[in-house]
Image (tube, rainbow, N blue to C red):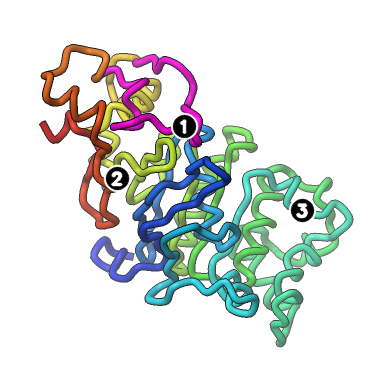
Amino acid sequence: MSETSRGAGVALGAHGLHVRFGTARAVDGVELEIGSGEIVALVGESGCGKTTLARSLLGLVRPAEGSVMHGDHPLSYARGALKEFRRHVQLVLQDPTGSLNPRHTVYEAVAEGLRIHGISGDEETRVSEALAKAGLRPPERFFLRYPHELSGGQRQRVVIAGALVLEPDVLVADEPVSSLDASVRGEILALLLKLRAELGLSVLVVTHDLGLAWNIADRVAVMYLGRIVETGPTAEVLLAPRHPYTKALLSVVPEINKLEPVVLVGETPDPSRIPAGCRFRPRCPAYAAVLPKEVAARCETEPPAVLPADRGHHAACHLTEA
């Protein structure tokens, strides 16, 4: 698929999305779009809100404010509409062992979605085609095997086949290779790239690994404490980062960017007590350094603007604007 055809339309998007758990603002005004045939990496530390955002985009968590868009249509939370939506937007979890019922054969695992959604037709052919697309060939060889009889990489391919059998247009992959051996990770990433090229799939990859983003994503969205703090084309964000948080994350990935190591002080703040002004300020190395007084004052009192969902390179940082 050419670069010009990718992102021609929006496959899945969040607009003004807020998710709260009591006083905790887990997702705090997010604008994000995944274009048709595009792979977007959502990156950040544990606890930054990226999994909650992904679950919201899947319709598994209902936002307090804002909307989820599937193509041109806002997501409806009526039971029938949600069921139809989830046929088109499929989740791939990080732990294939936990995702598969140990008592079900591979055939049953892949066919389960067809049965849940009441999809008629030649079930065996659909299961075979899904397994083949996921790289398990010949598919019939795997029909009667159980998860414990497969390698980790094969189990992840079964999980992917279970998503593909429903012919979705979007995959949301939550840390899809974090539980796999290094030798297998590249194979699964290559598979996702192949599926995008052959099927036109859009993919949101949720990860803490900027190296993974570098290898697979068209665009990167960096999340911190419930908000996207930097977004843009992968090469621009990872080779010329603008936000101090992105720079800190990249400083420990020397194969991407030759930055001096940055040690962030403290843990990710509590989302129920978001700091005034810039939410990254208490851990920000740039703020801790000598800043012009007018910039420091903005960092202390004025939250940076919510980033737009377009495909430009943006950072939510007063220092970048100065």
Q: Quadrant of residue 253?
A: top left
The magenta-colored residue range is 262-286
Residue assigned mark 1:
273
Q: Helix, strand, or loop for circle 3?
A: loop
Q: Amino acid at mark 3?
A: Leu
Residue assigned mark 3:
100
Q: Position of residue 202 (x, y in %)?
A: 44, 62
Image quadrant where one finds the C terminus = top left
- Mark 3 Cα within 10 Å, few/some/many (few <14, many 20+)? many
In the image, 138 versus 166, the foreground residue is 166
How far apart are labels 3 and 2 at the CA level?
34 Å
Q: Which mark is residue 314?
A: none
For the view shown, which residue lies furthest in the right direction? 103
Please name the predominant secondary structure of the magenta segment in the image.
Answer: loop
Comparing marks 2 and 1, which lies closer to the viewer? 1
First along the sequence among labels 3 and 2 = 3
Q: Amino acid at mark 2?
A: Thr
- Mark 2 Cα within 10 Å, few/some/many (few <14, many 20+)? many
Q: Can the viewer see residue 114?
A: yes
Q: Position of residue 146 (x, y in %)?
A: 84, 54
Q: Amino acid at mark 1?
A: Arg
In the image, 165 versus 275, the foreground residue is 275
Above or below residue 78? Residue 52 is above
Residue 280 in the magenta stretch? The answer is yes
Q: Would residue 277 be found to the left or right of residue 227 on screen?
A: left
Image quadrant where one finds the N terminus = bottom left
Identify which residue is drawn at 60% across, 40% down: 184
Q: How many marks?
A: 3
Residue assigned mark 2:
231
